[in-house]
Image: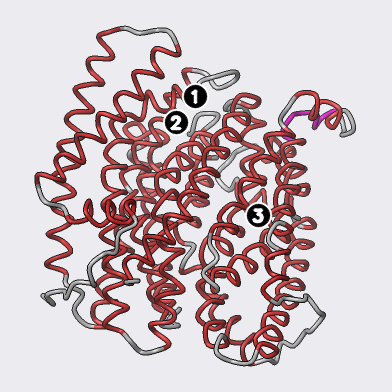
Amino acid sequence: MTEKRKILKSASVITLATLTSRIFGYLRDQRITLLLGTSLAADSFILAFQLPNLLRRLVGDGSMTASFIPVFSGYLGRPSAELWRFANRVFWALTILLAGLTMLGVAFSPQLIRMLTLFGKNPGQWDLAVYLNRIIFPFLFFIGLSALAMAILNSFHIFGLPASTPILFNLSIIILSLGFVYRPIIRLVPEAYRTPAVALALGVVIGGALQFLMQVPELVRKGMRFLPSLSFADPGVRKVGRLLAPGFFGLGIYQINFIVDRIFATSAKMPRGSVMSLYIASRVTELVLGVYAISVATAILPMMAHQAAARDYETLKKTFTFALRIVTFIALPGAVGLIILRQPIIQILFQHGQFSAESTQLTAQALLFYAAGLPPFAGLKLIVPAFYSTQDTRTPVRIAACALGLNIGLNVLFLEFLFSKLYNGGPPLASSLSAYFSFFLLFWLFRERLGRLGARALFGSFGKVLASSAVMGVACYAMLQFAARAGINVFFGRAAMLAVMIVAGLLVYLGAARLLRCKEIDELREILRGAELPPAETVAMG
């Protein structure tokens, strides 16, 4: 089986699980917006969930796998007892670390929420956020252990089960959002905090616990015994720690920038509901990003780690560039589609209950600028793990620090001088521009480190994808204008029209890509057919 086929097969398994999870994630977000809309309670819930969720994403979506897998890969050829002794020591070290962070998060919730509402004029309005943050923070403990379990299973090329665990998380919140469940719960809390957001917060914690517990049986089958074995002096544990600490920042800049966005969204200038509007816009963007970009990134990291351990850097470069082409083939048309169809997408998906037409307008404005950054967001999911596979954590951290400074500076500029033009779109635009800066600088440095990556061939491929996406964009815009003139006001009619536009746009894109001879179509089609792909091509190093 070729390296290409392994990547695509693993990514396909992860994509199926992730797509199912994203569907339930949409239902979860739809329930949250239906119950809370863009109210102060909605903003409080998002703020309370923000820091635990940030840490979850920093650990779960990248830094744990990126720091643990390269080290664990070095133990796979050793005796089983030594392998699992190392895994147990990492598990118990992480357990103690997460327990300490959880207790600190609960104790210092007022200070954390004050930090997240730095630009707000009335700190007292966020008392509900403090209360919710104390309920939610234990989620961090469970989800951190879940991330380690995922990293271990991914090392054995088991991807489907770990990728499926978020389904339980989403189901937990959905169940707690049902009236006959949340109403008895909120009667037990102080009157000032009697809102469905309290039950949703409990759902977050329960869902996190289920994500970890779901993976335990498979870990036990592979050989994990969870026997107490704590040793911070263990060379392997120390190595993981050295990689993990900077990994929070290097791999998580995308999520850290989202936090910065929401801090600026609490400014007194911003309309009420800005925090929730940015959250929903980012979730829609992540639907495209997560379904395939994260799947490919998850699949290639163990492969690149093995290649780096064997010092097979030529194959590592081919693995990276192949993954980058495939992800760009998905992300770029996804960005164009989101930009053009943002209004009907938000309207159909979320304009129900407390989520009004005004909420749709607010969210669509944010989605415009987040969608523009989708290609570099996807690229960062690949380029940072490429550095980590060679156990280089310093370079991504340095670039991330520069990008964070750029994001903060742009946010200040947009808020003070361009607010009347950008409105709540300033923070998303700042994040997108920072992502472009990070990706291109990291790409250049990666090329300087390992040699030529076939940039000429890469950008030729990107050019074809861009041209195909532009054709699709024109078709989607024309269909959108036709739909506006048709004046369809029935919900199911609008939903059907949106579905037709999305399917037609996809067909136009694939048709244009076929005419331009984009080879990514053949590569994806072959894996769907189950046929063997040809050997990895020899890239003309230009």
Q: Is residue 324 left or right of residue 425?
A: left
Please name the amino acid that badge 3 sits on. Answer: Pro
Q: Which residue is mark 2?
A: 363
Residue extending farthest right: 188
Q: Is residue 459 left or right of residue 134?
A: left
Q: Earlier in the sequence, mark 3 or mark 1?
A: 3
x 66%, y 38%: residue: 44
Q: Which residue is mark 1?
A: 359
Residue 336 forms part of the magenta stretch: no
Q: Position of residue 147 (x, y in %)?
A: 62, 64
Please name the amino acid that badge 2 sits on. Answer: Thr
Q: Which residue is mark 3?
A: 52
Quarter of image, res 305: bottom left
Considering the numbered disc 2 on the image, is that residue within a helix, a strand or a loop?
Answer: helix
Question: What segment is highlighted magenta in the picture?
Answer: 191-197
**In the image shown, does 8 or 117 lie closer to the viewer?**
8
x 70%, y 70%: residue: 221
Quarter of image, res 76: bottom right
